[in-house]
């Protein structure tokens, strides 16, 4: 167990310190404990958590130079993925806080709107809907990078209008398999090229009920 994490992360070019390894192990223990009282994840066995949560979360290094990122928001983070692994291994962020509320509401708040270099999300929403939740948080020049399944072509095609309307531009779609698995993943690189119109996101529930298409 001692070497599983380090070896797995080395496959995506990430080296961690002993202190970072301890933080990941503590995270796993907390995940197991909290999962007993609430359904955070169906994956709790250590090796699976490493492969399907930690490595998956950190695979963003394939498409983004995290050294150029100062501010990050993780929308719909659930059990802390991908935000917490990114914090532990990559970003060395100090000023971390969690917000419990609807993405549509906080995106209207000047304290959060268009304040972030990078928005990430492993939420399961359709890409058109997810873009309406997430792009309003990204500053012009920043990136929104959702974590998606390998079969993404139709979803990307169906989201192009929404992305454009919200001030984004799809730059690239990078597909890969998680190391040591046959799980297909995709990163959709969306560049924020202009400010999001004030009317977006629409009121709570609308982005999922009536996506921009």
Image (cartoon, helix red, strand yellow):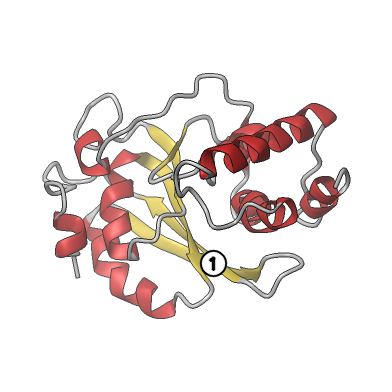
Quadrant containing the C terminus in the rendered view = bottom left
* Vertical order, 24 against 63 (above or below): above
How many neighbours does mark 1 have within 10 angstroms: few (below 14), some (14-19), or many (20 or more)? many
Circle count: 1
Report whether 91 appears left or right of 212.
right
| Relative horizontal placement of residue 28, taking residue 115 as reference (left or right) | right
Left/right of residue 209 with respect to residue 162 in the rendered view: left
Q: Up-down: is 78 above or below 48?
A: above
Q: Secondary structure at mark 1?
A: strand
Seen at 18% across and 47% down, the residue is: 201
Q: Is residue 90 visible?
A: no
Q: Identify the residue at horizontal 44%, vertical 44% (top origin).
A: 38
Residue at image x 44%, y 24%?
Answer: 97
- Residue placed under numbered mark 1 in the picture: 186
Q: Residue furthest top?
A: 95
Quadrant of the rendered structure where residue 65 is?
Answer: top right
**Camera-side residue of 140 and 151:** 151
Q: Quadrant of residue 126?
A: bottom left
Q: Position of residue 198 (x, y in %)?
A: 14, 41
Q: Residue at x 71, y 70 (%)?
A: 181
Given residues 117 and 100, the one toward you in this image is 100
Q: Which percent across, then down, holds residue 152?
A: 45, 74
The residue most toward the right is 3
The answer to whether any part of residue 6 appears in the image is yes
In the image: residue 155, left or right of residue 29: left
What x and y, as percent, mark residue 123?
Answer: 41, 55
x and y percent of residue 157 in the render? Answer: 34, 76
Image quadrant of residue 28? top right
């Amino acid at each position: 167990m001692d070497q599983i994490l380090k070896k797995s992360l080395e496959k995506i070019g990430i080296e961690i310190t002993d202190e970072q390894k301890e933080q990941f192990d503590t995270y796993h223990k907390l995940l197991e404990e909290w999962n007993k009282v609430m359904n955070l994840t169906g994956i709790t066995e250590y090796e699976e958590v490493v492969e399907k949560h930690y490595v998956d979360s950190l695979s963003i290094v394939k498409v983004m130079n995290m050294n150029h990122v100062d501010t990050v928001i993780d929308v719909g983070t659930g059990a802390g993925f991908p935000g917490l692994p990114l914090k532990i291994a990559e970003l060395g962020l100090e000023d971390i806080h969690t917000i419990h509320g609807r993405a549509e509401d906080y995106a209207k708040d000047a304290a959060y709107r268009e304040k972030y270099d990078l928005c990430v999300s492993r939420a399961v929403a359709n890409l058109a809907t997810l873009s309406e939740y997430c792009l309003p948080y990204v500053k012009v020049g920043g990136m929104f990078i959702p974590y998606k399944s390998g079969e993404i072509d139709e979803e990307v095609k169906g989201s192009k209008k929404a992305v454009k309307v919200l001030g984004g531009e799809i730059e690239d779609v990078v597909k890969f398999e998680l190391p040591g698995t046959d799980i297909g993943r995709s990163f959709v690189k969306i560049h924020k090229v202009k400010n999001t119109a004030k009317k977006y996101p629409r009121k709570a529930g609308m982005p999922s009920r009536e996506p921009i298409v």
